[in-house]
Amino acid sequence: MKGQGVFITLVILMVVSSIVLIWSIVLVERLHLIAQASEAVKALYAADSALDCKFYKIYIDNSETCPPILTNNTKAKINEVSVGGETTFQAIGWTTTTQIYRSFETNF
């Protein structure tokens, strides 16, 4: 009987350990997705800031330097393409640590 008790205890311990391991793997994946979403928002705001800066430069102050200098580990650039009298601006923002890119494009 003592051997059976030890065996049942070990089986229960292994089942509980397996459940904890599976849950920890799931939670780590979810935390990784949340961190990526946060970085994607930073990249989106960087692209938006670059586009806003370009419009500010066009309409209000031509001496403004674009894209703006950002301090949250993001960078941005603006591409300008003119075809047939229509100008297209593409603002690209990205995070320097995780290299997640987001962009906006508008015709002007």
Image: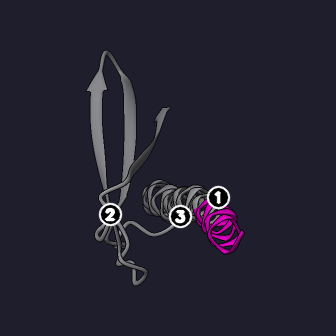
The span from disc 2 to disc 3 (Cα, nearest Å) is 17 Å
**Front tag of 1 and 3:** 1
Q: Is residue 55 magenta?
A: no
Check disc 3 and give the amino acid type: Val
In the image, what residue occupies the spot 31% across and 71% down? 65
Range shown magenta:
1-17
Q: Give the residue number, with chain letter if any, for mark 3.
A: 28
Check disc 1 and give the amino acid type: Val
Sequence-wise first label, 1 or 2: 1
Question: Residue 15, which numbered label?
Answer: 1
Check disc 2 and give the amino acid type: Thr
Q: Is residue 82 left or right of residue 59?
A: left
**Image location of residue 74, percent across then percent down:** 36, 70
User: Do labels 1 and 2 touch, CB within 8 Å?
Assistant: no
Q: Give the residue number, with chain letter if any, for mark 2.
A: 98
Whether residue 108 appears in this view of the structure is no
Q: What is the secondary structure assignment of the residue under circle 1?
A: helix
Question: Residue 104, which numbered label?
Answer: none
Answer with the quarter of the image where residue 26 lies: bottom right
Q: What is the secondary structure assignment of the residue under circle 2?
A: loop
In the image, what residue occupies the spot 58% across and 63% down? 14
